Image (tube, rainbow, N blue to C red):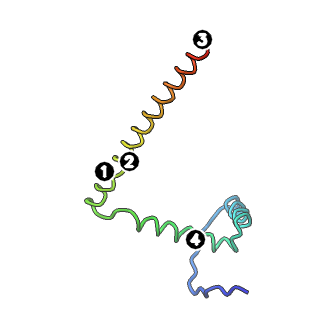
Amino acid sequence: MTIFPQRERVIGIRISEKEHVAMKKYCLRKGIRSIADLARKAIKAYMDSVEQMPSSDKERNLHIKRLEQQIKELRTAMDTLMRTQQIDMREAAGKDK
């Protein structure tokens, strides 16, 4: 039998009936014990993602530069794939004649 940590604090949120039904269905599909567990996990995931975000302007600028470099590399790779595809299509067209 699994022993779950004891929780002492309670928070409250208001949701619509439609949201409640959707959350219950989601919990059942994913094997989550309750909507409270779902909310706890969602809040934790959000907090973890926020903590990973750059906090200073310098870090943000560095992060943006890395993303720009990755975009540049992706464009180069896509251009290469497109050229290869065009060459393959021309070769295939030449063989059909």
Residue holding disc 3:
97
Name the amino acid type tagged 4: Lys
- Cβ atoms under marks 1 and 2 closer than 8 Å: no
Instruction: Say which residue appears at 25% left-offset and 59% top-offset.
Output: 58
Residue holding disc 4:
41
- Cβ atoms under marks 3 and 1 closer than 8 Å: no
Please tell me which of labels 1 and 2 falls first in the chain.
1
Instruction: Say which residue appears at 43% left-offset and 65% top-offset.
Output: 50
Image depth: mark 3 or mark 4 in front: 3
Give the Cα distance between marks 3 and 4: 61 Å
Q: Nearer the viewer, residue 86 or 28?
A: 86
Q: Position of residue 25 (x, y in %)?
A: 73, 62
Give the Cα distance between marks 3 and 2: 41 Å
- How many marks the image carries: the answer is 4
Can you say whether 72 is above or below 53 in the image? above
Please tell me which of labels 1 and 4 falls first in the chain.
4
- Badge 4: how crowded within 10 Å, few (<14), some, or many (20+)? few
Residue holding disc 2:
70
Instruction: Say which residue appears at 42% left-offset and 42% top-offset.
Output: 74
- Badge 2: how crowded within 10 Å, few (<14), some, or many (20+)? few
Determine the secondary structure under disc 3: loop
